[in-house]
């Protein structure tokens, strides 16, 4: 059982940073979802992330840093358009895949020549990262703090529920309240001449086009066979991911006794449990994962979801929903 810290003072963050330096795991909030952190230069600590998550060890991890000044050491080069993206969207829900430096070892990158980097926009995460850098740390590797294939946690309680049985006494869970974005960061492959979206998120294709002034492709919209290979590398883009225990059905009339998630403008059909009625697309993203968890807490066999239409963040929501509907 890990320790649960809900009052994260500067001292508490310094202690958490010290534990990370000593090889423990620290789960922490970010604006997207909660992450399970380890010192990204410590092979043993990173190995424990895989153990605790039950995740295949060839899946790469995102390295979190507090500031652009810590970026250079992790990468070997960066295109001009990626620099513009970092200036515009960091700290924020965006992960850039860049050519790696010597510091980004195979145990972080899954043996690939690239590394994923992100500066999260959450005061507690940034406080932890600052304290960690102060102790000489280069970056915190952190996947979403859920068991492999499950729904990402957006609260500290959900982390505890997911990983409590797998964490040890020296590991910590920091409680920073609910994540404000609610879906994982946009992942952009910046190893080529043009940016390519590997996972849609709150930084949308329109935003990336506007800042980069380039053609941006979204590989998640392409079902061609050569991407199958790549899907193995990006576990978040595996077809069956983000799945609750209940079976998820999309855009179908719910049967009696099932759960239901839809925008507030859509009425609740008779005999179903309304799990969420968000008023906006942003709220839909924010509460989606906790609504799926609520369905599991109520032991519902099935959850019916009316997907939001349109572009922007709705694309990220539909991306996750289509995967959770495929089950595990
Ligand atoms: O919002 C987020 O990104 C959260 C918070 C905690 O930062 N993290 C997160 O990590 O979602 P994770 O590990 O659950 O998902 C990261 C995805 C994985 O699918 C991984 O395969 C992909 O990023 N990834 C990481 N490094 C990569 C790389 N070098 N090349 C391709 N994909 C990479
Ligand atoms: Mg994940």
Image (cartoon, helix red, strand yellow):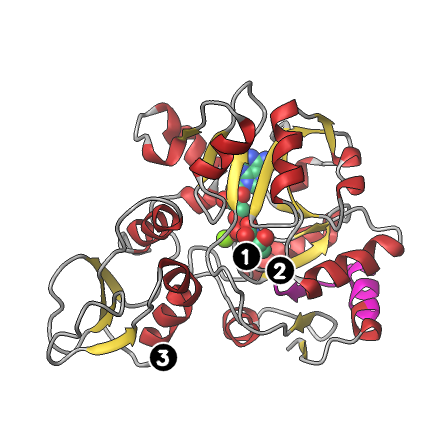
Distance from Cα at disc 3 to Cα at disc 2? 23 Å
Element marked by disc 2: strand
Q: Which mark is residue 184?
A: none
Which quadrant would the N terminus be assigned to in this image? bottom right
Please say if the residues under marks 3 and 2 sit with CB atoms less than 8 Å apart.
Answer: no
Please say if the residues under marks 1 and 2 sit with CB atoms less than 8 Å apart.
Answer: yes
* Residue in the picture at 75% in, 38% down: 71
- Give the side of residue 112 with respect to residue 102, left or right: left
Which residue matches tag 2? 36
Q: Residue 313 at x, y = what percent?
A: 40, 50
- Give the side of residue 158 with respect to residue 47, left or right: left
Mark 2, ligand 1, within 8 Å: the answer is: yes
Distance from Cα at disc 1 to Cα at disc 3? 20 Å
Mark 1, ligand 2, within 8 Å: the answer is: yes
| Residue 302 visible at all | yes
Above or below, 189 against 215 in this view is below
Which residue matches tag 3? 297
Residue found at the far right of this picture: 135
Above or below, 267 against 53 in this view is below
Which residue matches tag 1? 144
First along the sequence among labels 3 and 2: 2
First along the sequence among labels 1 and 2: 2
Q: Which residues are magenta?
A: 14-30
* Residue in the picture at 72% in, 36% down: 104
Which of the two residues, 250 or 47, is positioned nearer the viewer here?
Answer: 250
Above or below, 205 against 202 in this view is above
Please say if the residues under marks 1 and 3 sit with CB atoms less than 8 Å apart.
Answer: no
Q: Residue 91 at x, y = what percent?
A: 65, 49
Q: Residues within 10 Å of mark 2 (few under 14, many from 20)?
A: many
Q: Quadrant of residue 305?
A: bottom left
* Magenta-colored stretch includes residue 19: yes
């Amino acid at each position: 059982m890990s320790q649960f810290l809900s009052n994260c003072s500067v001292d508490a963050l310094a202690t958490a940073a010290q534990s990370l330096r000593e090889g423990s795991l620290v789960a922490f909030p970010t604006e997207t979802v909660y992450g399970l952190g380890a010192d990204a230069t410590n092979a043993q600590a990173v190995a424990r992330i895989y153990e605790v998550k039950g995740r295949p060890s060839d899946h790469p991890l995102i390295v979190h840093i507090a500031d652009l000044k810590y970026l250079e050491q992790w990468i070997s080069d960066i295109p001009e358009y990626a620099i513009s993206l970092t200036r515009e969207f960091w700290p924020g829900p965006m992960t850039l895949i860049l050519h790696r430096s010597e510091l980004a070892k195979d145990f972080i990158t899954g043996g690939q020549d690239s590394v994923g980097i992100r500066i999260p926009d959450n005061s507690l995460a940034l406080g932890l990262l600052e304290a960690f850098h102060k102790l000489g740390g280069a970056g915190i590797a952190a996947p979403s703090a859920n068991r492999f294939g499950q729904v990402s946690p957006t609260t500290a309680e959900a982390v505890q529920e997911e990983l409590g049985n797998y964490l040890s006494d020296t590991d910590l869970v920091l409680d920073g309240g609910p994540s404000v974005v609610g879906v994982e960061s946009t992942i952009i492959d910046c190893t080529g001449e043009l940016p390519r979206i590997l996972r849609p998120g709150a930084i949308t294709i329109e935003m990336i086009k506007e800042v980069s002034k380039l053609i941006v492709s979204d590989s998640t919209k392409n079902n061609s066979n050569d991407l199958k290979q790549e899907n193995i590398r990006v576990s978040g883009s595996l077809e069956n991911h983000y799945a609750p225990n209940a079976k998820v059905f999309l855009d179908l009339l719910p049967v009696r006794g099932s759960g239901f998630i839809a925008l507030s403008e859509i009425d609740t059909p008779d005999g179903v449990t309304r799990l969420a009625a968000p008023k906006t697309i942003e709220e839909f993203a924010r509460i989606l994962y906790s609504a799926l968890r609520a369905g599991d807490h109520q032991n519902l066999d099935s959850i019916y979801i009316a997907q939001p239409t349109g572009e922007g963040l709705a694309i990220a929501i539909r991306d996750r929903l289509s995967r959770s509907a495929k089950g595990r």
